[in-house]
Image (cartoon, rainbow, N blue to C red):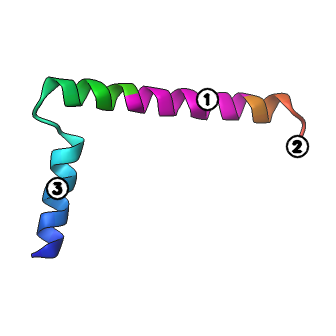
Amino acid sequence: MRKNFRTRSQRAYWRPKSVAGAVTQFALSGLLTLLLLRVLARGRATPA
């Protein structure tokens, strides 16, 4: 039962019903990707 509840909560979190929630999630994902790209670019620029 706990596993089912966990998956259900995750699904609700990943697929929000409200538009605002989806927008905020999209913005957060975009920021994370930007940070990742920046870190990768920095790593490439500086010789390891």
Quick check: is 40 in the magenta stretch? yes
Mark 2 neighbour class, 10 Å CA radius: few under 14, some 14 to 19, many 20 or more = few
| Residue located farthest toward the bottom when viewing the structure as drawn | 1
How many numbered marks appear?
3
Q: What quarter of the picture does the N terminus occupy? A: bottom left
Circle 2 residue? 48
Give the amino acid type for the residue marked by disc 3 in the picture: Ser
* Residue type (three-letter) at the residue carrying disc 1: Leu
Per the image, label 3 sits on a secondary structure element best described as helix
Range covered by the magenta-colored residues: 28-41
How far apart are labels 2 and 3 at the CA level? 41 Å
Do residues under tags 2 and 3 come within 8 Å of each other at their CB atoms?
A: no
Residue 18 placement: quadrant? top left
Q: Is residue 18 left or right of residue 23?
A: left
Figure check: 37 above or below 6: above
Q: Which disc is residue 9 wearing?
A: 3
40 and 18: which is toward the camera: 18
Q: Which residue is mark 1?
A: 37
Quadrant of residue 34 within the rendered picture = top right
Mark 1 surroundings within 10 Å by alpha-carbon count, few (fewer than 14), some (14 through 19), many (20 or more) = few
Residue depth check, mark 2 versus mark 3: number of the one nearer the observer: 3
* Closer to the eye: label 1 or 3: 3
Marks 1 and 3 in Cβ contact (< 8 Å): no
Residue 21 lies left or right of residue 37; in this view the side is: left
In reply to whether residue 29 is colored magenta, the answer given is yes
The residues bearing labels 1 and 3 have C-alpha atoms spaced at a distance of: 30 Å
At numbered mark 2, what does the secondary structure look like: helix, strand or loop?
A: loop
Disc 3 crowd rating (10 Å Cα; few below 14, some 14-19, many 20+) is: few
Q: Which sits in the foreground, 44 or 27? A: 27
In the picture, measured across the screen, residue 38 lies left or right of residue 20, that is right
**Residue located at (76% from left, 30% from top):** 42
